[in-house]
């Protein structure tokens, strides 16, 4: 009997804030429940991969992120805080867009170790942006001010209820996963996005009508795929939204193929 897949999820960070008490005085690393449940929906073991911090009071062993890449079967880079513009050679246009450089460094190293190990990587929302930056690309720091308001990519009031249309690029890997779908509605919960695609990344979907990049795939080596929307927020009983199953199943099939 084949063993269960072991899929690593990158951690989200909550950093200490002035005046915080209790646990919030410390850096907290966590998983978003919807993402964990989505990946586990296919009888997969999900493990959060903590950052490796050498500056703490308690010193860890000699474990490295590459040890997780060796032991696990695939990596999901989940959503969360903005990337720091400094991670792609820019200064924040506003202080509130400074992002999380500490998490960027951790996830870029994690991404590189899984790619080097030949393990598949799936990026969601922040995850697609991280993949792009790790491969030398850049981001729009703020879509409303840098692209315009043709498409509402984020609505804080309705959060995961915000949706917009995407167009799938003909002949792409995403088109093969959805053979009878040219356009679809997806969740949208972001104000940053891929601007200049990184090395060897092929665009597989764009939003309508503003053409913002919504999906990318790495060509030529290994399996790396990223989507700007949140497939884990797409309820199976909501026929309006793009079925999230083919995305997860393709990623897990790649992981099984490498066991």
Image (cartoon, grey):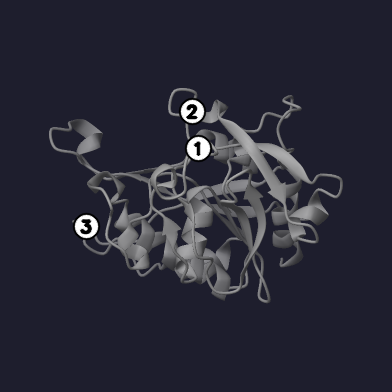
Q: Looking at the image, which residue is at 58% across and 61% down?
A: 72
Provide residue 172's location: percent of width, then percent of height. Answer: 76, 60
Q: Which quadrant, please, contains the C terminus?
A: bottom right
Disc 3 to disc 2, C-alpha distance: 35 Å
- Label disc, if present, on residue 210 of the rendered structure: none
Q: Looking at the image, which residue is at 47% across and 30% down?
A: 155
Q: Nearer the viewer, residue 231 or 118?
A: 231
Taking the image as shown, residue 218 lies to the left or right of residue 68, namely: right
Provide residue 65's location: percent of width, then percent of height. Answer: 44, 66
Q: Is residue 1 visible?
A: no
Q: Is residue 220 visible?
A: yes
Q: Nearer the viewer, residue 72 or 175?
A: 175
Question: Which secondary structure, mark 1?
Answer: loop
Residue wearing tag 3: 56
Q: Looking at the image, which residue is at 33% across and 59% down?
A: 85
Question: From this viewpoint, which residue is outermost toward the right?
Answer: 180
Q: Nearer the viewer, residue 51 or 241?
A: 241
Circle 2 packing at 10 Å, graded few (<14), some (14-19), many (20+), is few
Residue wearing tag 2: 159
Look at the numbered discs 1 and 2 and tell me whether their residues touch, using CB distance below 8 Å: yes
User: Which badge, 1 or 3, is on the more N-terminal residue?
Assistant: 3
Question: Which secondary structure, mark 3?
Answer: loop
Residue wearing tag 1: 189
Provide residue 47's location: percent of width, then percent of height. Answer: 53, 49
Q: Which quadrant, please, contains the N terminus?
A: bottom right
Question: From this viewpoint, which residue is outermost toward the left?
Answer: 19
Res 74 → quadrant = bottom right
User: Which badge, 1 or 2, is on the more N-terminal residue?
Assistant: 2
Image height check: is 91 above or below 70?
above
Question: Which secondary structure, mark 2?
Answer: helix
Q: Looking at the image, which residue is at 25% across and 61% down?
A: 59
Look at the numbered discs 1 and 3 and tell me whether their residues touch, using CB distance below 8 Å: no
């Amino acid at each position: 009997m084949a063993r269960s897949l072991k899929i690593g999820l990158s951690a989200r960070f909550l950093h200490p804030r002035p005046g915080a008490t209790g646990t919030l005085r410390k850096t907290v690393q966590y998983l978003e429940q919807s993402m964990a449940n989505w990946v586990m929906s296919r009888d997969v073991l999900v493990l959060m991969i903590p950052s490796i911090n050498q500056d703490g009071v308690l010193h860890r062993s000699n474990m490295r992120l590459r040890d997780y890449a060796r032991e696990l079967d695939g990596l999901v880079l989940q959503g969360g805080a903005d990337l720091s513009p400094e991670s792609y050679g820019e200064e924040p246009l506003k202080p509130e867009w400074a992002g999380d450089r500490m998490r960027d460094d951790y996830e870029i190293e994690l991404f590189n170790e899984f790619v080097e190990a030949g393990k598949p990587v799936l990026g969601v929302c922040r995850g697609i942006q991280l993949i792009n930056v790790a491969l030398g690309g850049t981001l729009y720091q703020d879509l409303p001010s840098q692209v315009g308001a043709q498409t509402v990519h984020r609505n804080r009031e309705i959060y995961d209820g915000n949706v917009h249309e995407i167009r799938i690029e003909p002949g792409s890997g995403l088109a093969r996963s959805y053979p009878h779908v040219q356009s679809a509605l997806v969740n949208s919960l972001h104000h940053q996005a891929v601007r200049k695609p990184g090395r060897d990344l092929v665009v597989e979907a764009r939003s309508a009508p503003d053409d913002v990049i919504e999906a990318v795939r790495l060509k030529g080596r290994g399996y790396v795929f990223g989507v700007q929307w949140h497939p884990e927020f797409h309820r199976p009983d909501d026929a309006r939204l793009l079925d999230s199953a083919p995305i997860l199943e393709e990623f897990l099939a790649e992981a099984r193929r490498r066991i």
